[in-house]
Image: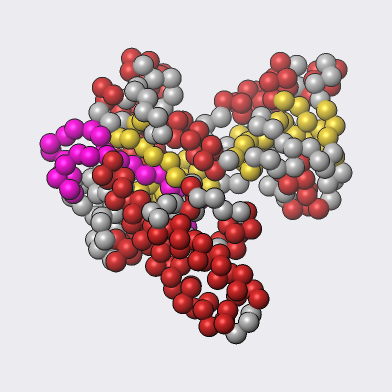
Amino acid sequence: MSFSIGIVGLPNVGKSTLFKALTKKQVDASNYPFCTIDPNIGTVAVPDERLDKLAAIYNSKKIINTVVEFVDIAGLVAGAHKGEGLGNKFLSHIRTVDAICQVVRKFSDPNVIHVANKVDPKSDEETIRLELIYADLATVEKRLSDMGPKSKSGDKEAVKMLAVYQKVKHILDEGKLLSEADMTDDEKLSIRDLNLLTVKPMMRVLNVDESEAAKEVPGYVVISAKVESELAEMSEADAREYLHTLGLEKTGLDRLITAAYTALDLITFLTAGEDETRAWTVKRGSSAPQAGAAIHTDFEQKFIRAEVTPWQDLVACKGEVGAREAGKTRTEGKEYIVQDGDTMYFRI
């Protein structure tokens, strides 16, 4: 599977600069609000060194990584839920993504105008949080007004849904994101058709000065968009050396994707052979048949068993034959829960 991340934030916090660096795709990042009107979309292969090592053993003709789609969405301002700035466009674009990456500004550059004329990450974050909540409230209140007459008529399903919508409204009225609230899986499933924004997993990126790029701030992925822009123009060897001088082991892209996997609760299993070595991304907790469905629906419906080898063992044993001889390959049935890094061969 692939997944999408919407990059959001107030105008001029570095969203488009970060997007350009992450995707190495040229976008307009001029220094004025609402430069990004229509969303810029860029796809990135998820870095995974395991694929290279497996492909070398199998002499694979091609390597296929999981793909993440980044969507750079127009800057948000206070009042967006009422159509202020480009609010309506912003809200329509963000409803389609799987997760939200909220960028807040910490970097100091007097030449880059801040829409609020001050650099205050917490204030920026609260503005975005409230706009998402207000937008969801409007959606839920409309559904409540539509559901009222149906529930009064004695429609049992309408009565049940009315209670769910009232609970959701109460959560939002308290200023909470639905992703942070205590809701059952059934309740979450019942409101899926509303495409509510505050249900989506949210990551927070703190865009800092170059000198602070190696800092750690709890709850944030700390990234210097300026550093990432420079890295995007370098060779791999030069980029590694530059990261080392900054005290960093991984690029912002790597760290952001790691955060996305955690937020979306995803893992990766692998398939390898002469034709291709490939990464498959599925929800954590997926059974072997459910994981197989990522390849083809037949793999779930006609599943018999799966041969599973941890990727490290497959590399260490230099392939399937060595792994079997060393007892590293297991046969698993329908109840097996797939683990990150499993290399799998499905029997159907």
Q: Going by the image, does 117 lie left or right of 328?
A: left
Q: Nearer the viewer, residue 161 or 65?
A: 161
Which residue is painted at 41% across and 34% down in the image? 219
333, above or below 298, in the image: above
Quadrant location of the C terminus in the rendered image: top right
Q: Going by the image, does 169 lie left or right of 9?
A: right
Residue 307 visible in the snapshot: yes
Which residue is painted at 40% across and 29% down in the image? 218
Measured as percent of width and height from the top left, residue 190 is found at: 60, 63
Q: Main secondary structure of the magenta part?
A: loop
Measured as percent of width and height from the top left, residue 12 is found at: 23, 45
Determine the image quadrant of residue 306: top right
Q: Going by the image, does 40 lie left or right of 182?
A: left
Residue 279 visible in the snapshot: no
Which residue is painted at 36% across and 61% down in the image? 134
Measured as percent of width and height from the top left, residue 196 is found at: 47, 60
Is residue 96 part of the magenta span, yes or no? yes
Determine the image quadrant of residue 21: top left
Q: Nearer the viewer, residue 177 or 171?
A: 171
Colour approach in the figure: secondary structure
Q: Nearer the viewer, residue 220 or 64?
A: 220
79, above or below 312, in the image: below
Measured as percent of width and height from the top left, residue 302 is found at: 84, 50
Which residue is painted at 59% across and 40% down in the image? 266
Q: Going by the image, does 5 lie left or right of 290?
A: left
Is residue 169 part of the magenta span, yes or no? no
Q: Which residues are magenta?
A: 94-121
285, above or below 153, in the image: above
Determine the image quadrant of residue 276: top right
Count of numbered labels shown in the rendering: 0
